Amino acid sequence: MRSFTQELGDLANKVSGEVVADEDLVSPYATDASGISSTPWAVLRVGTPRDVELAVRWAAPLGVPVVARGAGTGLAGECVPIAGGLVVDFSTMNRVLDVNKEDRLATVEPGVVNKWLNDELKTAGLFFPPNPGSWETSTIGGNISTNAAGPRSYKYGSTKNWVASVEVVTGRGETLRLGTKSRKSSSGLDLLHLIVGSEGTLGLITQATLRLSPVPERRLGVIVPISSIQQALQALLILGKTPSLEVSAIEFIDEVCVKCLNTYEGKKLPETGGALLMEVESTDEGFEKTMEHIYGTLSSIKLPAESLVDENVDSMWVTRGRVTYSLQRRYGPRHREDLAVPLSRFPDLVRGLREMLAPLDVEPVLFGHAGDGNIHLEFDHLKLGEAEFSNLRRRMYELAVSMGGTISGEHGIGVLKRGYMDIEHSKAELALMREIKAVFDPHNILNPGKDFC
Amino acid sequence: MRSFTQELGDLANKVSGEVVADEDLVSPYATDASGISSTPWAVLRVGTPRDVELAVRWAAPLGVPVVARGAGTGLAGECVPIAGGLVVDFSTMNRVLDVNKEDRLATVEPGVVNKWLNDELKTAGLFFPPNPGSWETSTIGGNISTNAAGPRSYKYGSTKNWVASVEVVTGRGETLRLGTKSRKSSSGLDLLHLIVGSEGTLGLITQATLRLSPVPERRLGVIVPISSIQQALQALLILGKTPSLEVSAIEFIDEVCVKCLNTYEGKKLPETGGALLMEVESTDEGFEKTMEHIYGTLSSIKLPAESLVDENVDSMWVTRGRVTYSLQRRYGPRHREDLAVPLSRFPDLVRGLREMLAPLDVEPVLFGHAGDGNIHLEFDHLKLGEAEFSNLRRRMYELAVSMGGTISGEHGIGVLKRGYMDIEHSKAELALMREIKAVFDPHNILNPGKDFC
């Protein structure tokens, strides 16, 4: 029998990209932003899409796991090779291949960073709307694979709304082009949306054509101090149905976040109990009217907005981005949750989570994409025993699902939530997912042990 | 061996709905708006969702085809039982079960007619955006199964954007709930979007939760005479990127449509060469500004809009709806196409189709959802031999696909385009679709001979 090193030599000879297996070269590929860790046996730094086909065909008869990786910013361990195997590093395939202004489409390689793409689109007056927290470093391939979202999903929806087509190498070693550049289609099964959010379990994305949106003429940031989550919901509902306000994002941070921002980041936010951070879009012409509407709407619900409207939305997003850093400085690394429920249940979810956590002395902090009913909850899980922690998670997920919600709004399942899929999905549904995987990946080599598998 | 009548008696005893097999009762179920015809062996008028499970479990061991039917308005034969079998009539399951204003969700039975739902939603200030030509009679179940679209998809997209979750009975006789009421989710494979547009080949929809949008305060209709398709594209591109105009639909009708409307419907449209019909949304407050913007934008591209802006959008849509009636009166029943391409290629598609058809003496007429690059082309196919017609279709579809387009923008594949799927989809992709079908429908009883099967 040939050794793995010999087999790997065969792969290295076939591909145009680089194959590495030295410990110091593969160890950086062991983990992602989840902190979950497992070292791969080898890494392929992709040269061309053809390399991916060759790698899958090489891996299939050997049963070597194949795990796609972009920037490694995933929060659920999606790109961690927990069964070992070959990590396919797409960060080397990072070109914007084409931008079509008239059709508002961009064709990109999967390793393009979200921010780079958006920088390049500026001259065309277009942008790719999904903006996960990691957008300055995460790749489009990763955004697609996790169906990433972010604050602006309140108006624009998740990544799935913005993918026109993908080129993907399945576990059969075949390259497929799925989807269409046309704005709509009713032809055959929608395999494209099966790939989006499938976390590399069905195929490896080697190219994507994305839909783009025109950049609004103005974007305003509004930071609104609030005194309770119920007041936040009231504001959310009124803002969401004010026809003259084009709200694109509504974020919530709790009183601990506000205090941490003030303490560690030198902000001077009123410590009333929390805050909403909103992005409002406007035309140049309608700008003053928009400002009036913001003031009017917020004062109609007795929220003190006047002094907090900021015409520079970027500075508001820098503040929002600083939330996690300031929490890190205050608490160090902790468990972070990503639950989403229908908007009307958001206060009930927050209340329910607080009640569960209050007796536990784990210093919970709540923030998230309130407009989407999506909460990111942080707490000190290290103060809990393993069974207690697992039991708590199960109760939290059951609460969200009982409200018609989901155990992951945008971070994905990966390794982190794999053991809890039964809460949201029936046995029959999970069985279908696994059989569909077997169709795409008959040798079961693509990202085993993730998501539903 | 037991007779089919005996077997059918078993089914009738099990279900709460009505089972009929008399020729005069089943013959109305033989066809739909495509004109394709094949009489079913029997019909189940569904009483409860449980009936559907019972019917599938009854049909599976017998190998009886099971074909879901809503209002029978499909244009591609989706609900025609071409292999015989049992038609499952959902028009009897037609209740709106719940409307949630805060979450903007409606839960409905599949037989609810699109218009009924929208009538019921008016008091809540909400609407279900997809508006196919058949919206006054077609059902939500049918809209979902064909991923129906319509004029307003220019702003709002196809049905797939507006389905939160479905309850579906697979060919295994299992009821699944797919999707979530949460606004976003990254949990597991997206089986929901696999069901949308699958034309009853994977499962029968027994309930759906739909996403809704707030009704705009004002909707204006604008009819703009144009002299060429190139001028239409120029208008489309400029209208689409005017930030102060919220255009929700842009329709195109050619000079023949205009003449037919004038002759048979008593309209008085200028016969300049065709027209664009647009729907523009506005707030009450911004209404006058919007009117100014429409005039300004159209005059900037030298289009004579002033006399044609109509504050009553409904009358414009009645005019648009009359296009097909007036063509019927002029020509009788003819072949109708449904191709879509990226917007920038729309004039090339129109030019290419005209060049193909010009030598054939088939009196082509062009109209459609121009803003989505979606053309409906009518012509007198009866003047062509069978092979000539089929060859022509192949060339038309190849043209659309070569431009990055699709062979069906919104009508679906059904029986009508089944023989042409290889033009848009690779062998490997079609093979995957069929294997996925086998996962959902191992006995191959659900709508056999349709779409990709």
Image (spheres, coloured by chain):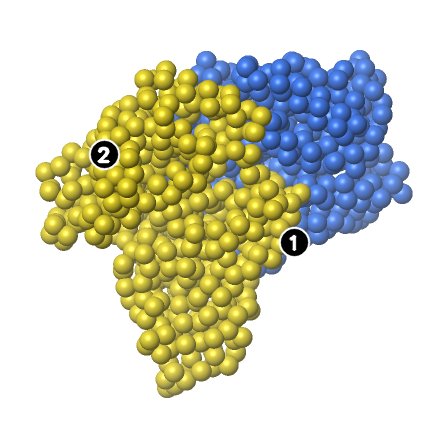
Chain colours: A yellow, B blue
Q: Which residue is mark 1?
A: B422
Image height check: is A175 above or below B256?
Answer: below
Question: As shown in the figure, which amino acid type bears the numbered disc 1?
Answer: Asp
Label 1 SS: helix
Disc ID at residue A110: none
Give the residue type that dot 2 points to: Glu
Residue drawn where x is 32% and y is 66% of the image: A30
Neighbor class of circle 2 (other Cα within 10 Å; few <14, some 14-19, many 20+) is: many
Picture quarter containing residue A320? top left
Expressed as whole percent of the image width and height from the top left, the position of residue B225 reads 79, 24
**Left or right: A296 in relation to B361:** left
Q: Position of residue A101 (x, y in %)?
A: 65, 45
Reading the image, the residue beneath label 2 is A255
Q: Residue B220: give x, y in percent of width and height.
A: 63, 18
Asked where in the image residue A294 lies, by quadrant, the reply is top left
Can you tell which quarter of the image residue A84 is in?
bottom left
**Residue B19, percent from left and from top:** 47, 28
Going by the image, does A437 lie left or right of A176?
A: left
